[in-house]
Every structure is written in structure tokens, then in C-alpha cells.
Image (cartoon, coloured by chain):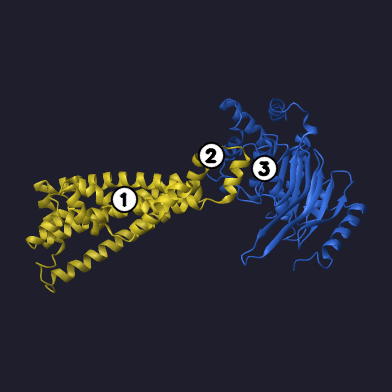
Chain colours: A blue, B yellow
Amino acid sequence: MQAALKIVEETETMPNTEVGRIDIENASVTFTGPGGERIEALAPTDLVIEPGSFISLIGPSGCGKSTLLNAVGGFVALSDGSIRLDGEPVTGINPDVGVVFQQYALFPWFTALGNVMFALKRFPMSKKERRERAIEALREVGLQGRENTYPGQLSGGMRQRVALARTFVTSPKVLLMDEPFGALDAQTRVVMHEILLRVWEAHKATVIFVTHDVDEALILSDKAHIMSAGPGRIIETLDIDDERPRRAHQVSESFLNNRNHVIGLLRQPGAEDH
Amino acid sequence: MEAQLKKYAQLVISLSGVVAVWWMVSGFGLVNPTLFPAPPQVLAAAVELYRDGVLISDLKISLTRAAIGFAIGSTLGVLIGLLTARVFVFSLALEPFLTLLRPIPAIALVPIAIVWFGIGEGSKYFVISYTVFLAVWLNTHAGAAGVAETYIRASRSLGANRFREFFEVVVPAAAPHIVVGLRLGAALAFLSLVAAELSGASSGIGFRLQDARQFIQTDRMFVGLIELGILGALLDSVFVIISRRLVHWESA
């Protein structure tokens, strides 16, 4: 995708595959609960996320996966430790870090095209160029002809495709996804996985993908970090070496082994939340 | 289309039913016609008022007062509502005060408005814009304060500055509430208009009502009441149509 790559060339001197390294050192998040008790949402965590890699955070609710994601996004402040993006400490919301939210994050008062163009407004370019790039980004997620449709008239899957286009159009270094397909049905999800991988391979951002669906994590990511609650922490990291595309209906033996292993981990006492 | 037709049919049936009952009650001598005039009497009074020129001039003057009061009150209401909801200093300074003002009805302000602004147009504008302001402020404030955090996060992570965040995210996100406030404000403009005109006015629909009372011209009073009803209903339907276009994404 030429248009989006051009932005990266304008804003970055380094090649795109070299950017998007995340160093998480001793990072922890604690907050005070309603009764005044101290809640450790994320125990001190060390993690290095390689540039251009696709990692999943998987675990039950309360395991700190969203907290860790939000800390990388600058939405949640760390209580201790540090998170650095390409060496720069994360101190707040950063437009180099794109976010695809669970749902309801498209602006319903803008059309699909308007939503994508919103992301391009911070760049100095003519309205015509902004429009062309936004149309191209929508085409890339298979939404040509839907430019002037409002989010309210789109299906859940199409809305998340617009959200994907809106985020990828500026070629962010990092893409954070917080259970983006959790509200979609199984068939739509399969389509979304294919679109996401295609767009990711074209843009090569570092992706942090939060999910509680084991299959989803195994199909999409290079590495899956399995997390557990009380306090939220990473209990194991799994390298997934299977060739892409991986399909849930044509699983390899290693896929099955990984899946059994992860489900076993999540079922262990102490790793359960209900 | 069919639903629209149904609505009109319902309106015609309901109104003709009411007029029929009204006509029967007054026509059969069940009530004193001086206190409760029959439809032909009211119609004759309306024609007489029209011929005298006061029907139209009252309508014009009352609508102008309501429109100017509404314009002042709603502009201030939207502006201050956005500020008290999104700017901490304004919320700190104004919110408690405005919350205290809310229970004071427009009619209670009429005496002080007359002392401050005289019996001219100023006191009417003041009373109407006060009422409209409070309704619009309250709704705008609620809407702008309740903008979903996800929209704000999305806007910031997409690199929008605070200026763009305000005009492209906060204002449209609050728009459905603002529109509700404006619709309520328009209805209240009429209520406070009558409150303002009932005392200390020499023209307008409210004045005509008060004037007719002095001569026990109940037929003229009925004309005034029917005028207010029709105006209010028309205005409200206009608002519904405008707001549907303005915040079209709400119904989707």
C-alpha cells in the first residue's frame, strides 16, 4: 500500500520493519478498590515485543491483559517500572500507537470515509489526497463502495473493518487490539482474521492482540502470552511456529498440542476466575 | 407513507370528536354559554379578532418574543453547557449556582424582571431566555459530560488535538442531548411567554387572554388558548423533523 508507506517515509528515517519495539520492564499497575483495598491489576512484568511481531495476550477476565494493553497505549499509568516504545518511554496517548477497540469506537456521526479521514487530519496534505488515501484504505479491507455509509448502517464485522482501516491508514508502529472480534459471530470472525493478517502483512506493525479465545490467539499470533489473575501476570509464553495461513478447521498436530496445553494452563487452579 | 396517513386520520378523528362533544355540551344548553361558549361563538370571535387586525399582530408579536428569547437562551445554554461539562473552571464556578436556579419557575421571575427591565420587551426576553437557557444548559451539560470515554480515547489515539476533539467528537456526541434540550426549550419558551405576557404587557396572545378576562369574553379566551395549542404542536413537529435530520445517526 503505497500511500500509507509514504507517510512512514515522511515521518520515520528507519525502515518500517525496524520500528515498533516495545520494552516492558518491571511494569506494574495497582489501584485502590472501592473498599480502600489495594488491587494489583498487573504484577511486575518484564516483556520484550519484537518489531513487527504479532503477539497475543490470553487469559480469563481480571488477568491484567487489558491493563497491560492499556498501559502500552498510555491510557493507564504505571505504578512502577517502565514501558518504552523504540527506546522512548510511554508517557501518554501516542498517535504512533493505533488502537482498535472492542466496539462502539467508530464515530457514528461520520461516514465510513469520514472516520478514516479523521485519522489523516493530523498530516499536512490536501483534502483530495486525504480522501484518496482513505478510499484506498477502505478498499484494502474490502469496503469499496461503502465510503458514504454511516456506521449505524453497517454490520458489526464491517464496522470493525472500518476501524481497522482507520487505524492502519496512518501506518502506526504499534497496533493494540482489545478483543476486537469478541462481539462477532464465528463465520465473520474467520473473515476478520484473514483481513487482519493481510493488512498486517502489508503494513508490518507490531500487534498486541488481547483475547480470551485460545483458537483466535493460536491462529493469529507469533507468540501467545498466557496470563492469570490474582494478581494479573504472565504465567507462560508460547512460541507458535506454524506456517500461516492457519485454519481452525484444518488444524495441524502442533496446533492441537498448543491448544491442549493452553487450555490445560487456563484450567489450572489459581488460573481460573470462576 | 401509510403510517403517516394513519397519523393524520387519527388527528382528524380525535379533533372532530372533541369538537362534537364540545358542541353538544354547549349547544344543548347544559352549561352557561357566557362561561362556556359553543364552537360557532369561538369561530365568530376569531373572525372578529382577525378583522380588527389584532389576531395577526398578537401572533406576530408573541412569536417574535418567543423567537428572540429562545435564540438568546438556547445560544447561552449550549455554550455554557459545553463549558461546564468539559472545562473544569467553569464547572467549579457555575454548576452549583445553576443547579440552585433550576427549581425557580419563570413566573416567579416576572415581578423582578418588570422592576429591572420595565414592562417593555426587555422583561419578556429576560423571562423567556432564562427558562430556555436552563433547559438547554441542563441537557447540553448532561450530554457533553457523558461522552463515552472510548470516543475520547479513539480521538486522542488518532492524533486529534483538543480543539478537534471538542468540535469533531464532543459536540457531535452531545448533539442528541442538545437537540432534546432545544426541543424542550422551545416548548418552555411558549409557557414562559404567556407567563410574561399575562402581567405587564399591552399586546400578544397572553395579554389578549388577560384582556378578555376583564370583559368575561370567554370566546376570545378560547381563541387564545386554541392559538397556543396549535402553535405549540406545530413548533414541536417542526423540531422533531429538524432533529431527525440533525442527529440522523441516532435513529439508525
**Residue drawn at point x = 26 percent, y = 65 percent:** B17
Query: Farthest residue toward the left?
Result: B215
**Residue drawn at point x = 30 percent, y = 63 percent:** B14
Q: Amino acid at mark 1?
A: Leu
- For residue A91, which numbered disc appears in the image? 3
For discs 2 and 1, the disc positioned in front in the rendered view: 2
Is A48 or B43 nearer to us in this picture?
A: A48
User: Which of the image's four quarters has the C terminus of chain A?
Assistant: bottom right
Is B106 or B8 nearer to us in this picture?
A: B106
Q: Amino acid at mark 2?
A: Arg
Q: Is residue B131 above or below residue A139?
A: below
**Residue drawn at point x = 24 percent, y = 59 percent:** B108
Residue A146: which quarter of the image? top right
Q: Position of residue A82 (x, y in %)?
A: 74, 46
- Circles 2 and 1 on the same chain: yes
Q: Residues within 10 Å of mark 2 (few under 14, many from 20)?
A: few
For discs 1 and 3, the disc positioned in front in the rendered view: 3
Q: Is residue B71 left or right of residue B157?
A: left
Instruction: Find numbered disc 2 in the image and state the secondary structure of the residue it sits on.
Output: helix
Residues under numbered marks 2 and 1 in contact, where contact means CB atoms less than 8 Å apart: no
Q: Residues within 10 Å of mark 3 (few under 14, many from 20)?
A: some
Instruction: Find numbered disc 3 in the image and state the secondary structure of the residue it sits on.
Output: loop
Q: CA distance from mark 1 to mark 3?
A: 51 Å
- Circles 2 and 3 on the same chain: no
Q: Position of residue A201 (x, y in %)?
A: 79, 37
Residue A172: which quarter of the image? top right
Instruction: Find numbered disc 1 in the image and state the secondary structure of the residue it sits on.
Output: helix
Q: Is residue B121 above or below residue A260?
A: above
Residues under numbered marks 2 and 3 in contact, where contact means CB atoms less than 8 Å apart: no
Residue A144: which quarter of the image? top right
Q: Amino acid at mark 3?
A: Thr
Q: Is residue B19 above or below residue B247?
A: below
